[in-house]
Image (cartoon, coloured by chain):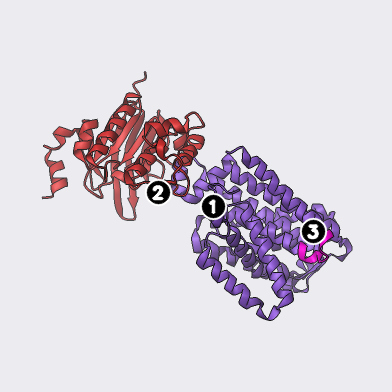
Chain colours: A purple, B red
Amino acid sequence: MRRGLWVESALVLVVVGLGFALSPFLYGNESLLFSMMAYVALAQGLNIAYGFTGYLPFGYVGFFGSGAYGTALAIMFLHAPPIAAVVGGGLLAVIFGIVLAPLLRLSGAYFAIANLAASQALYFVVANPHLSNITQGPYGIKLTSVFAPTESYATLWVIVLLATAVAIYLRVSRFGLALRAINQDAQSAEVAGVNVVRGRLVAWLLSALVAGLAGGAYGWHISVFYPHSVFTLRISIFAIVFVLFGGAGTVIGPIIGAVLLYGLYDVIGISTPEYFQLIYGLLIIALVLFLPNGLLSLVRKRVRYVL
Amino acid sequence: MSSEPLLSVTGVVKRFGGMRALDNVSLELSAGEILGLVGPNGSGKTTLINVISGLYHPDAGDVRFHGRAIQGLPPYRLARLGINRTFQVPKPMKDMSVRENVQVAATFGGGGRIEPDSVLERTGLSEFAEREAGTLNTSQQKELDLARALATGPELLLVDEIGAGLNPEELKEMAERLLELKEHGVALLVVEHLLDFLNRITQRVIVLSAGSQIFEGSLSDASEDDDVVQAFIGG
């Protein structure tokens, strides 16, 4: 590994960390900044699964929703402190990831569809009125007693840095080299001595953990939410588009994608909401046509290694 | 040195549905020995290599390496034990550099014992080290496939039609490379249609036909064996 990568890695963490730590002092809409951070975490988490191992989880939102509900249940029934509850939400997402691990035997569209179905099944279980005494069913969760916007913002900030650090680790480590090999050709990687099943599983569970933690912090921050708010497919689709827009398999691609596109989403949504879907749709079409490997592919042609 | 063979395959059966791709195949191979595996298309040669390298589980029979039963072990475990292979159609990790391809094998299969650059030098790939593997031509990809296998430091190398698509000069170099490995004590099981190429590196062959072993002996005797002639030419 190039020695300069350590410097670049530290720089990325500092820029992301300072950016989201200072921006609330420079820009008043904290709710927008919080959502942007949640999407940076989600994009990075999805990147861990898709960019590093090639699995595109259309139902990625299932982990986000598990995290939000896991956190809520830990607060409501176990009276856990919110930060511990967020960790619990992350672990619940990991358990959901373990349950879905057999899907890793599938590939391509089959995996994407099966994962999508699983996340929707989870949504219907959570929203089931018969489970109202546990999940509150369709009536939604209220965590107003622990509402703490600053603390929950800080918690998500830590999660974003954690997700970035995980992506950096996968980009520069021995384990990351194994994942790249698996992504390229699983059979060749296996005969080269790489434990393919373990590599895929670890990346999958890390990806689930990131989304679960982000969902937990999100649930805590907004404090009132419904099954649809944390299981809507729009969350999966946004995360996928952000990753593809920035550049999958890199550390900075998903960050750039989420910040730029979510920023743009809000600018258009506020200034010209009537054209929002048109402009966003055209942008996605242009991306697929002209930059299928993301914005960073422009730089990659000149610089061989982009973090 | 012990008299126990490095690899011993006994009564291996592999079925695909109702078809017996391998039917009671047995062979033994010692360190520093080259065994040729020949037979018409569909006779089970690659299936046998897939069984030994862990890609397929045999339905019956026994595969032993250093006397230890290895059937059912996944390929990555076998790579770490010292068994590796090349593919009939090379399967490089295309977007990774040539050096990274070899580095993956050296790191995970070879446990870091082998320096990737030394393998690249031995296989004549040093000048392409930084190139993306997908940009190599067929013969270079075959060399890379071999380099990837060698980077794991194999004691047993299964070579699947490495001569196909190589020109006469490249075939000569490849034969020398395999003989050099033999000199270093590596056991080689070589599947090959090019009998001239095989003749350069070994005399000992096994002939398969429709999954069954129909001949074991010298290559020159094989060409005069009635069963072998019938299997190849029909009758």
Name the residue nearer the viewer: B175 or B37.
Answer: B175
Q: In this view, does A244 lie to the left or right of A83?
A: left
Residue B160 at x, y = what percent?
Answer: 31, 42
Give the mark, 1 or 3, whose residue is nearer the N terminus. Answer: 3
Residue A191 at x, y = what percent?
Answer: 44, 41
The numbered mark 1 sits on a residue in which chain?
Answer: A
Q: Is mark 3 on a helix, strand or loop?
A: helix
**Labels 2, 3: one chain:** no
Residue A255 visible in rendering = yes
Name the residue nearer the viewer: A307 or A180.
Answer: A307
- Identity of the residue drawn at 19% across and 37% down: B196
Instruction: Provide the residue span drawn in magenta.
Output: A25-33
- Identity of the residue drawn at 58% across and 67% down: A117
Name above or below for residue A133 compared with residue A156: below
- Identity of the residue drawn at 66% across and 47% down: A166
Most common secondary structure along the magenta stretch: helix
Residue at image mark 2: B135
Magenta-colored stretch includes residue B104: no
In the picture as drawn, the residue positioned furthest to the bottom comes out as A274
The numbered mark 2 sits on a residue in which chain?
Answer: B
Residue A77 visible in rendering = no
Q: Disc 2 vs disc 1: Cβ atoms closer than 8 Å? A: no
Please state which of the two labelled residues, at mark 2 or mark 1, is closer to the viewer: 1
What is the distance, in whole Å, between disc 2 and disc 3 at their CAs? 45 Å
Magenta-colored stretch includes residue A30: yes
Residue at image mark 3: A23
